[in-house]
Amino acid sequence: MKCFISSAEKPVLYESCGNLISEDHFLHMRRVCESFVLLAVQKGTLYITQGKKAYEISENQVFLLEAGVEHYGHKASEGYLSYYWMHFRFAEDYQVVQEDSGEFCNGVAENVPKEEQYVIPEAFHLDSSNRVTLLMVQLLDLARRDNFMVTKRTIYASSLVLLELTQEYIKQQNRIRQEFPAGLTQVMEWIQAHYGQTLTASSVAERFGYNTAYLSSLFKIYTGYPLISYVNRLRISVSKNLLTNRELKIYTIASMCGFSDEKHYMKLFKRYEGMTPSQYRKAFFQKKVNEF
């Protein structure tokens, strides 16, 4: 799952908001938006595909439609559907972190003050208080009173929505982190520091005194991936940042991230990201060109 992080020193660039209500069979259009779109489902289920992955967004869940990525409804809603939506852009550059790589849990949550950054998950289940949806209702009320024009009130109200979502998400991530066995957290932190080395499940397990199968099963339980899959996803996540440096060759990046075989790196990258490293690099710089 992706997480989008940007500075909160400035309010977000709010564009518009609304409330979609459908009695039955709503199917989201196919499109690519230049801005981000935050959805908060109030009732029913929204079926939507983004980046070739299908999602079901139900009551008390939020979902972020990524700027520049195609999305569309892959199935019509069944019965009543209501969700609030908000179009916005970050005022500053943003970073994309793969939450399932462990990078978020092992760094951002404890090191980034929530009042200084927006930390927005691609998909998230709100807690029982559901303050995010309440703030979106208030934003819509302000927008109506301001004749749906972009005003200071709607700009700061939309920023408050994202800051509240940031707070809820970080609290949940910290809670999940605290539930990790202490030994597993130690292993994850060590992998974070040594992913560029040659690592095998057995070598990591031996270093920390674990049975190899047992340690791999722990990773599966708490991260969703067996140990080596976890390591490789972390490496791919790191390599995406390195690919933004045009001076680095693909084989150099593969080696820096712990892959001794460039072809294996390229195969895993395409499996996880749906494109080759070269295609990712080209898409990144094309996006930067389009932003100017």
Image (cartoon, helix red, strand yellow):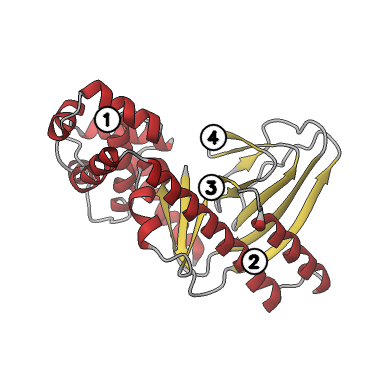
Q: Disc 1 residue type?
A: Ile
Q: CA gap, disc 2 to disc 3?
A: 17 Å
Q: Name the residue under label 2.
A: 158
The residue at 45%/59% (across/down) is: 5
Locate residue 48 relative to residue 214 in the image: left or right. Answer: right
Residue at screen point 80% across, 74% down: 146
Numbered label attached to residue 52? 4
Secondary structure, mark 1, is helix
Q: Which residue occupies the extreme right position in the image?
A: 23
Q: Which of marks 2 and 4 is in front?
A: 2
SS at mark 4? Answer: loop
Type of amino acid at the residue the image marks with label 3: Glu
Residue picked out by circle 1: 228
Does label 2 or label 4 sit earlier along the sequence? 4
Q: In this view, does 188 lie to the left or right of 86?
A: left
Of 232 and 204, nearer the camera is 204
> Could you tell me how far apart the alpha carbons at marks 2 and 4 are, in whole angstroms?
28 Å
